[in-house]
Image (spheres, helix red, strand yellow):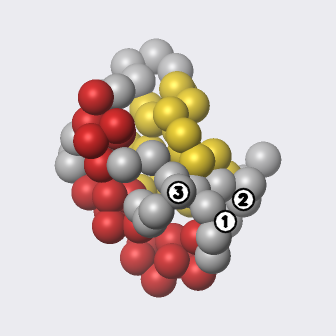
């Protein structure tokens, strides 16, 4: 599976209507300095101390938004 990693702060700039709200993400532990990754299907995973935790998903044209925000490509 391929992912693009980013900070929690970057992810919060990408969230749109229909996806998880910033408040929902904060309740499950997302912080500006968190490490998250998004796969090609839009699933968001939060890095925990010893595992990745699925916390939601992005909808719409998220691929272009992610690449523009991070400057990264899928790996």
- For the residues labelled 1 and 3, the Cα–Cα distance comes to 23 Å
Tally the numbered discs: 3
Left or right position of 16 against 45: left
* CB under 8 Å between discs 3 and 2: no
Which mark is on residue 18?
A: 3
> According to the image, label 2 marks what residue?
40
Q: Nearer the viewer, mark 1 or mark 2?
A: 2
Badge 3 element: loop
The residue lying toward the viewer, choosing from 18 and 25, is: 18
Residue pictured at 72% horizontal, 59% vertical: 40
* CB under 8 Å between discs 1 and 2: yes
Left or right position of 57 against 28: right
- For the residues labelled 1 and 2, the Cα–Cα distance comes to 8 Å
Q: Residues within 10 Å of mark 1 (few under 14, many from 20)?
A: some
Quarter placement of the C terminus? bottom right
**Of callouts 1 and 2, the N-terminal one:** 2
Badge 1 element: loop
Q: Is residue 37 visible?
A: no
> Residue 42: where, in percent of width, then height?
65, 55
Which mark is on residue 74?
A: 1
């Amino acid at each position: 599976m391929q992912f693009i990693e980013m900070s929690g702060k970057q992810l919060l700039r990408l969230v749109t209507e229909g996806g998880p709200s910033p408040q929902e993400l904060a309740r499950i532990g997302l912080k500006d300095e968190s490490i998250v990754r998004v796969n090609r299907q839009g699933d968001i995973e939060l890095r925990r101390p010893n595992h990745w935790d699925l916390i939601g998903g992005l909808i719409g044209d998220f691929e272009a938004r992610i690449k523009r925000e991070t400057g990264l490509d899928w790996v």
